[in-house]
Image: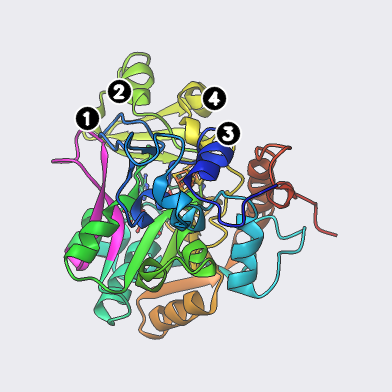
Amino acid sequence: MPSDKPQWAELYREVVTSGLCTGCAGCVVVCPHDVLRYDDAAGGGTWRPWKVDEDGGPEDCTHGIRGCTMCTRACPRFRTWETEADVHLFGRPRDPGEVAGVSDQIVLARAADPEVRSAGQDGGLVSAILIWAIEHDVVDAALVSSLEGDGTSWRPVPSVARNRSEVLAGGGSRYTYSVNTLAYPKAVEAGAERIALVGMGCQASLPAMVSARKAGKIARRLALSIGLLCSKTFDDAIFADLFDTKYGLRREEISKIDIKGVFKIWMRDGEYHEVPLKEGRAFTRQGCLACPDFAAEHADISAGGIGSLDGWTLTLVRTSRGSEVFQGLVGDGMVETRPVSDDPGVLDLLQKLSRASRRRWPEGAEPAARQAKLPG
Ligand SMILES: Cc1cc2nc3c(=O)[nH]c(=O)nc-3n(C[C@H](O)[C@H](O)[C@H](O)COP(=O)(O)OP(=O)(O)OC[C@H]3O[C@@H](n4cnc5c(N)ncnc54)[C@H](O)[C@@H]3O)c2cc1C
Ligand code: SF4
Ligand code: SF4
């Protein structure tokens, strides 16, 4: 019989050790008793949370026994998470055909400012949104990913961006995991009260989750969720053991990586290389193996690079908050848009990749997240 006050003991059993945990660190940042830990060592780390030995041992929590449920409230993989967040955001569970989640508008978009575009991975849309939201006092700060040191190690670091230059410093994609959520305490310490979270679906569901389950101040503070479409992330070892050992591509000489059917790798000396995507499979991060969310389904705005038009971001505007922000950017001339029909096939690809991710959700787990019905 499931407990009506589920706490760490249930989270540990049903998510952390069952294969569902993504390592998003949502539970860690909401814990009011500071008993959960996460090792975010650049290029290594444990990728999933654990509890300190005191206060109930690693598998239980004395605060939980006394009624604290914060970690399970935050977790975007706990029990009926997907339906709860859908109903909270959209007022209804999704239709089985909505495999990429509910959206209000799908367009192609790019930053109007060439400097923002060139800092971005695709159209620089995400950076443009963050700059606009900070400069228009919609948020005080954004939780993003930046790169360690001068960037040559390619190791991502969760960071707080408070202005245009900090946003642009984090632009572009790293395909190893960046636990942007972990920058939350730093943003709060710096006085931020309205915070945007950028992250792949596993992290982008956190604001909806804490709001749906009324998880205290964090629900009010996470004021905007910007999601990145995502099939998987890779372990840091991919740099040394695949790109370098097999192809001689040293990480410090790589200037940009993109994934479009293959790893597309640009070097600082101007050379360009391709590495077959299937060779990366062995380096898939464990936290991604059961993830059903390709399209960052609970973000206010989701952004991706699939499709045939380089330099444009596939943009799914999902919520009313997302719509207000996007209309603000369009109205101020900060983004350019074009209809998604300019890229025939991109919506089919979105459906196909979303269905593929949903098939990874284990059969024994809450069934909603496996639904992957073909429309019609
Ligand atoms: C790990 C990963 C996997 C992805 N997989 C796909 C995919 O399969 N299909 C697809 O269409 N799109 C995928 N994307 C999204 C795509 O790469 C672009 O991020 C997206 O199109 C937005 O581009 P942009 O130019 O508008 O964003 P930008 O303006 O470049 O902004 C990107 C934002 O993402 C943040 N960021 C960068 N790397 C990470 C990271 N590792 N973790 C968390 N935040 C990060 C940056 O800090 C920045 O704020 C993936 C992105 C990541 C990070
Ligand atoms: S999925 Fe996220 S919130 Fe849930 S247990 Fe794992 S790290 Fe914690
Ligand atoms: S596949 Fe992407 S969205 Fe899913 S757990 Fe991995 S990083 Fe998160």
The reply to whether dot 2 and dot 1 touch (C-beta < 8 Å) is yes
Which residue lies under the disc numbered 1?
A: 253
Q: Is residue 305 visible?
A: no
Q: Which residues lie in the magenta part? A: 142-165
Q: Residue at x 31, y 29 (%)?
A: 44
Residue on which the image places disc 4: 278
Question: Any magenta on residue 140?
Answer: no
Quick one: label 3, few (<14), some, or many (20+) residues within 10 Å? few
- The x and y percentages for residue 316 are 55, 65
Distance in Å between CA atoms under marks 2 and 4: 17 Å
Disc marking residue 249: 2
Whether tag 3 and tag 1 are in contact, CB under 8 A, the answer is no
Residue 32 as seen in the image, left or right of residue 99: left
Residue at image point 20% right, 30% down: 252
The kind of residue tagged 2 is Leu
Tell me which amino acid carries mark 3. Ser
User: Which sits earlier in the primary sequence, circle 1 or circle 4?
Assistant: 1
Q: Which residue is mark 3?
A: 18
